[in-house]
Image (tube, rainbow, N blue to C red):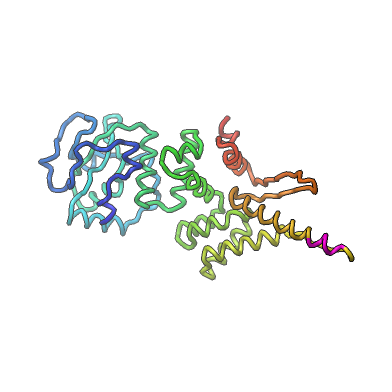
Amino acid sequence: MSNQTKRLGRGLEALLGRPPGESANMAGTPSKITTVASPLTDAMLHLPVGDIDANPFQPRQDGDDVAIKELAASLKEHGLIQPIVVRFVDGRYQLIAGDRRLRAARLAGWKSVPVQVREADDRQVAELAIVENLQRRDLNALEKATSFQQYLERWKCTQEELAGRLKIDRSTVANLIRLLELPSQIQDALRTGKITPGHARALLPLGDDREQLALCKQIEAESLSVRTTEELVAELIRSADAEPINPIAGDVRKARSRRGRNEHVSALEQQLRSALGVKVDLKQSSTGRGKIILHFRNHDDFDRLFGELTGRPGRRKAG
């Protein structure tokens, strides 16, 4: 399979370093692999599949059985292009990278697999598990979001710090984590493929669970595109924010001016809603002074907003 022809990728190599003397194909050549009893760093070993423990930081929750079967068939035909990466922990070997390859090797009936022993602490292993799956697109959007959120909570860091360590855009981290704010029914629809991540992100600015659920059902029933969903969300927000204008006779020009200002303010509020994922009210006086009001639904919503605006974890969690 094409996934197996890829190297670790820049993200993984940046975190682990590049294996020295990496072999082109590890299958069917155990004589070229040095088998040693001690867990030497950078050692190339052939380990029994039962001696390799799972990665405790693996973010994948839903396995793709069909893909694993295809990969197992590929291993039987072509062998393993690159070794599985492990570390030595408490007298056992623990998987760092190569979860799908290890599962496929077991399914193919392999008794042992070639491995590369590397040094990595828990934080590096957690990062590597995320990067490997991001590069190979093995995770659905909610699994990625959950892995990001768990990492932030475990290591008490900001979204910007995580993005920097993974060498990805901060917006990627923020946009995925926001999906966890959606109602569970919408998350289920996303997880099962009834709606796409684009649909889910389009629903976020509504901020109201009932409106989000109603529109989600409409997306499923009518097979709405992401663009159409975004337009419907914008229309719902404009309708909710619209203020009736009753011009007094002889004051039509003033009413038109007020209508123009209202449309401009509504557009700005919509942009802020899309960026922050909450209801936003803009208030401005004729002198230009004003205020921005952000509405949050619960403590978690406040913590997320606090982090977005300050670049630090929410105060509740930081304490």
Provide residue 66's location: percent of width, then percent of height.
31, 59
Residue that protrudes farthest toward the right in the picture: 249
Q: Is residue 157 shown in magenta? A: no
Measured as percent of width and height from the top left, residue 40 is found at: 21, 29
Residue 38 % position (x, y): 19, 29
- 203 and 20: which is toward the camera: 20
The residue drawn where x is 84% and y is 64% is: 252
Q: Nearer the viewer, residue 193 or 54?
A: 193
Q: How many numbered circles are shown?
A: 0
From this view, report whether residue 46 is shown above or below residue 66.
above
The quadrant in which residue 218 appears is: bottom right
Is 59 placed above or below 65 here? Answer: above
Whether residue 247 sits left or right of residue 29 in the image: it is right
Position of residue 75 measured from the top left corner of the image (x, y, whole percent): 20, 53
Q: Residue furthest left?
A: 31
Quarter of the view holding residue 210 = bottom right
In which quadrant will I find the N terminus?
Answer: bottom left
Q: Main secondary structure of the magenta part?
A: helix
Nearer to the camera, 243 or 74: 243
Q: Is residue 83 left or right of residue 215?
A: left
**Which quadrant, please, contains the C terminus?**
top right
Q: Residue at x 35, y 31 (%)?
A: 121
Q: Residue furthest bottom?
A: 222
The answer to which image quadrant residue 243 occupies is: bottom right
Residue numbers of the magenta segment: 251-256
Horizontal side of 274 relative to 104 (left or right) equals: right
| Viewer-closest of 191 and 21 | 21
Residue most extreme to the front: 253
